[in-house]
Amino acid sequence: WKSVDFPWTKKLEANNKKVFGNHSFRPNQREVINATMSGYDVFVLMPTGGGKSLTYQLPSLICPGVTLVVSPLVSLIQDQIMYLLQANIPAAYLSANLEWVEQQEILRELMSGVCKYKLLYVTPEKIARSDVLLRNLESLHSRGSLARIVIDEAHCVSQWGHDFRPDYQGLGILKQKFPNTPVLALTATATASVKEDVVQALGLINCIVFRQSFNRPNLWYSILPKTKKCLDDIDKFIKENHFDECGIIYCLSRMDCEKVAEKLQECGHKASFYHGNMDSSQRAYVQRQWSKDEINIICATVAFGMGINKPDVRFVIHHSLPKSIEGYHQECGRAGRDGLRSSCVLYYNYSDYIRVKHMLMQGVIEQNPLASGTRRNSLANTERVLETNLENLLRMVSYCENDTDCRRLLQLIHFGEKFNPENCQKTCDNCSKILCLIEKDVTDIAKQLVELVRITGQRYSSSHILEVYRGSLSQMVKKYRHENLSFHGAGKHLAKGEASRILRHLVIDDILMEDVKKSDLYGSVSSVLKINESKAQALSSGQLTIKLRFPTLG
Ligand code: ADP
Ligand code: ZN
């Protein structure tokens, strides 16, 4: 598909320069365009900022007829339309927030002999709920004027993705109604299972897949322990490595954003905050300040980032645990668009897991705007989505707990990509450690910990269980008379942190579960360990062994 001998090649080159002002094509852009213009269904995985829009906007100029683009978010659509109209490309959109009259006018235009639009953007809800739109598309199609169907952010089709949108599942109707119209599905995040889901739900036929490596060699990844003085650590990290440079700090809650921004201002940084509780003019103001370099650092929830195209972001710091590896990868991906070295640092502690889990279960977590669009979930859907979210979160915890494997490898495996860690060149924390590791079978310790959780009635937190296991005589241990248990002190001989790592591993492996609850009226959160019996059974019967790698001297 690389060939430059297609009948449209000359027109492509000319329009790419003249209309879009690009001197060349980015990786895979030409290939995707050639494949879709040859009439094939095409699935494109391209990292954020890779230039997906061009792969349908450029063909729309060259092919006769209208290109239908399904896109999840009205604000993104409006940005695109503004950009297209500036480039003199006739484009329009249909969504529920337009006036009735405006919608009627656009629909009438679709029915007219020669439709003036080259691109028509719609939200997935429109396809799912507007019979009128479908009829107009049929009319367009019968006149041979439906050039191509584009599904942007196609991973929203899949429940396994991190931005599942039920209305995307209805998009299969497009291929049913217009089997010969080429479909172009675009996404920046898709694991193998998400890809399969998307292909199936959209009904793509003999689809050609283009995927680019998701590895970003200029990003340096590390995970640091999050302690009480995390904000001092962040201040110091920035001063030592990126003073006066541009960066994003992702925070979990709105309050955290404000707190972190305030602290950084006190320390002499040009920082501000951005979250979903601000009105749109405030948010636009902060974004403008940031684009113009009047502020360097934005402390934001994941609401910040869609459509952000600043090339010189030198660091992305996670002040708390991201909700999924996909989300984490995408948030980190906002750094170093210009290809220069940039840092991605995540401050992690296990108790953030409990906090995020609780927020997910309460549905109070701030979502990336993609995921929080108009949702009309059935109860069953909601439960399934929560389950997926919790699973994704646990994988993220496992990524953070892993202090031996290459971070790139861990991320890329998640996207179904192979990676040789030697190519990391010590650009992640784990690869740059000079450690000898030894693998230990910790099955017996794991069994003891599970037993301890069982005999204490599945009513205590992980820190309490650890205290008992390590033989502490703290007030709490005495209060419950746990010093009398036979397991009290059974783990005395273990090195510091070892028992706790094994316990966390049991949670990651789903043998133990954190049962999170609000513990008092003031909303503080507590969690007790419960046993997942079927998994625990495998452990106690010897079907399951647990091996972990530990650092050693020599
Ligand atoms: P994506 O949707 O993949 O995140 P976009 O389509 O928004 O990426 O493109 C990201 C940026 O790259 C835009 O500013 C776009 O103008 C620019 N761009 C896309 N293709 C090219 C190209 N061939 N040459 C130069 N710039 C490009
Ligand atoms: Zn590495």
Image (tube, rainbow, N blue to C red):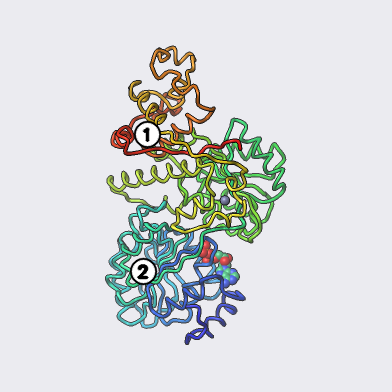
Along the line of sight, which residue is nearer the eye, 191 or 142? 191
Q: Secondary structure at mark 1?
A: strand
How many residues crowd around disc 2 within 10 Å: few (fewer than 14), some, or many (20 or more)?
Answer: some
Q: Are marks 1 and 2 in contact (CB under 8 Å)?
A: no
Residue drawn 39% across the image and 75% down it: 148
Q: Amino acid at mark 1?
A: Met
> Does the Cβ of the disc 2 residue fall within 8 Å of ligand 1?
no
Q: Amino acid at mark 2?
A: Gln
Instruction: Give whichever of discs 1 and 2 has the lower sequence position.
Output: 2
The CA distance from mark 1 to mark 2 is 54 Å
Q: Position of residue 3 (x, y in %)?
A: 50, 81
Q: Quadrant of residue 360?
A: top left
Along the line of sight, which residue is nearer the eye, 333 or 309? 333
Along the line of sight, which residue is nearer the eye, 359 or 501? 501
Q: Which mark is residue 513?
A: 1
Q: Position of residue 302 (x, y in %)?
A: 51, 48
Left or right: 435 with respect to 500?
A: right
Which of label 1 and label 2 is nearer to you?
Answer: 1
Q: Which residue is mark 2?
A: 104
Q: Position of residue 30 (x, y in %)?
A: 51, 76
